[in-house]
Image (cartoon, rainbow, N blue to C red):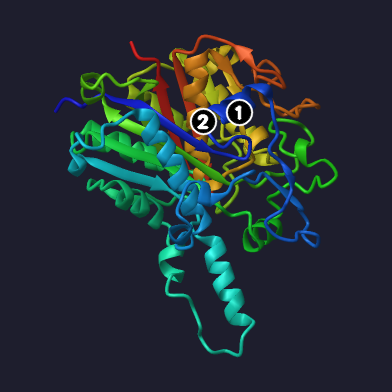
Amino acid sequence: MELKRVVVTGLGALTPIGNTKDEYWDALISGKSGAAPVTHFDAEKFKTKFACEVKNFEVTDFIDRKLSRQMDKFSQYAMVASDEAIADSKLDLDAVNKLRVGVIWGAGIGGLETFQDEVLNYAAGDGTPRFSPRFIPKMIADIAPGNISIKYGFMGPNYTTVSACASSANSMIDALNTIRLGHCDVIITGGSEAAVTIAGMGGFNAMHAMSTRNDSPETASRPFDANRDGFVLGEGAGAIVLEEYEHAKARGAKIYAEVVGGGLSSDAYHMTAPHPDGIGVVAVMKNCLENAGLNPEDVDHINTHGTSTPLGDVAELKAISEVFGDHAKTININSTKSMTGHLLGAAGAVEAIASILAMEHGIIPPTINHETVDENIDPELNLTLNKAQKREIKVAMSNTFGFGGHNACVLFKKLD
């Protein structure tokens, strides 16, 4: 069976550094940090008092007030980003066969704020269960794609992938394979997360996973720097319209890039720590290259998982050196988490968008906040430190990993 070709025809982003894909891109290449003191709740007594929140966002500018109250923040973010991506794709919603349009979405946690608030309200009462009838529908992780499909009438496959921080990368790979096999013409994919909450911040602090650089939040996310001390929690959404190539060509769609491969693997090592030698990461990148029919030397750019954690950054770069050999030194490697923070289940989609736009514009966004060389990192690797670099990109790789040892890798190629 001959596999269909799959291309990107629409992008949408709602991030801590920009509320549209264009704002996001402008902030990326200028090296803007999205980290600032938390405003969603009083974090004064928390170990970490800052995060990368979405800013200047009023949901009723996009969604009817009554409907917005029926959605957790992660669903609101999903709706806004997908609206932008669908509009960007210029898909004719009256002409398209909606039975062949699906929504495959990623969320690592889902409606955490809704769950938190309902339980806190119950605990503050007299023990009488007074839960909102909207509690469960607002909270469940699969409700975001459900809301998107209901709004647009898309009747193809509709579900959420949950693999912690690899969730939206998994959703993109599922979408890729569904179209490749001829089951759909178009899929809206991506991911959203809204975990900057009492429970989210408290939980990650208890794990000692987050930076506590409270005196300088904007410099706290510092992938590959010797003095990194954990990730910075982010929130938002990224949406991507994937489309069968001939379908896109027939309607004259703008094509950003071709999605040529997706790889998956597991570390099978530890609940939260990566294997120190990055063996699962080696496997996922090799799987992705094989799936795409590409060689290591074909890759020009890698947007790493690069969370700014002491163990994770080193393991990933070791894996890159093993897979790419001497060619690794010619690749532009970066971590856009240095600016956006870690969007958990939305990370893969938001970072894939960065890779696609880097390819379109011929500019690699920087890894900001790097001050001190880590002796455990190969100094010959080009980590695109502190300043954007111009470069023609024909093939870009995006890596995303999650607690539980989940690894996902996606490859994008400039259309021939």
Task: Answer with the quarter of the image where residue 231 lies.
Answer: top right
Q: Quadrant of the C terminus?
A: top left
User: Is residue 384 depicted above or below 399 in this figure?
Assistant: above
How far across and down, in percent of the image, does residue 84 sit?
Answer: 43, 36
How far across and down, in percent of the image, does residue 170 sit?
Answer: 40, 42
Query: Dot 2: what SS?
Result: helix
Identified at 38% across, 20% down, the residue is 257
Viewer-proximal residue, 286 or 350?
350
User: Is residue 363 depicted above or below 1 in this figure?
Assistant: above
Residue with the mark numbered 1: 317
Identified at 81% across, 27% down, the residue is 372
User: Is residue 326 depicted above or below 353 in this figure?
Assistant: above
| Total count of labels | 2
Task: Answer with the quarter of the image where residue 331 lies.
Answer: top right
Cα–Cα gap, marks 2 and 1: 28 Å
Residue with the mark numbered 2: 21
Left or right, 249 with reference to 197: left
Identified at 71% across, 38% down, the residue is 221
**Res 266 visible:** no
Which class describes the residues within 10 Å of circle 1: few (<14), some (14-19), or many (20+)? many
**Res 79 visible:** yes
Viewer-proximal residue, 133 or 222?
133
Q: Amino acid at mark 1?
A: Leu
User: Where residue 93 is drawn, which disc sits there?
Assistant: none
